[in-house]
Image (cartoon, grey):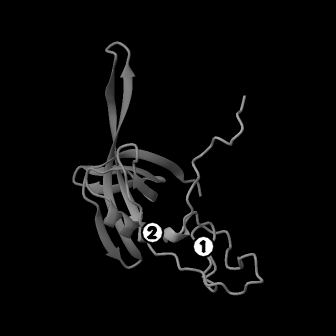
Amino acid sequence: MNDTMVTVVGNVVDSPRRVSLNDGSVTNFRIASTARRYDTSTQQFVDAGTLWVDVECWNGLSSNVSASVSKGDPVIVQGALTTHSWESENGRRSAPRIRAFAVGPNLNRGTAVFKRDRPARAAEPADESTTAPDVSGFDGAPGNFGNPTTGLTLGRDYEADAETLEEMNADLSSEPAHA
């Protein structure tokens, strides 16, 4: 399939609308992305044209977007660009649409607090003699990061429990100097 993949940085211009359908749930919203350029004659930044685009988010992304995104939020949307066409009283109409694979806050414009969908299950030690985790359930597919039989999770950068985090030593005085 030759999808046209795009990443659009903009602002949400209407409240996301979530609808449950027979084949899953979908959340739709619209974003506006206005390009800015530096005008050397006036020595200031000026707005260029605005791209208005509809965004559709399906299933798990649908519920996360509807719970997290509001009108006015600065967002970054990544997905496949399509054209939505329909018949109106004025004839055939069309508008660009992004089938989103990822939506997130634009951290250049503020801060965010991330909350995982499902808390990670703590792995119970199965056998002291086993040093490597059982990775038989990992097939390399996106979203399959662990073995459901053992409860082990691969690729975790941190655990939710503060006791499992180690303090960093910020003293770099013993580091060799680079020329």
**Amino acid, disc 1:** Asn
Q: Residue furthest top?
A: 41
Depth check: 91 or 94 in front?
A: 94
Q: Residues within 10 Å of mark 1 (few under 14, many from 20)?
A: few
Depth check: 89 or 135 in front?
A: 135
> Image height check: is 7 above or below 150?
above
> Image height check: is 63 above or below 13?
below
Residue 113 visible? yes
> Image height check: is 24 above or below 93?
below
> Image height check: is 22 above or below 174?
below
Please provide percent x and percent y for residue 150: 64, 84
Residue 160 visible? no
Q: Name the disc covering residue 144, or none.
A: 1
Please provide percent x and percent y for residue 161: 49, 71
Which residue is under mark 2? 116
Secondary structure, mark 2, is loop
**Mark 2–mark 1 distance (CA, rounded to whole Å):** 15 Å
Mark 2 vs mark 1: in front:
2
Left/right placement of residue 28 relative to residue 175 reads left
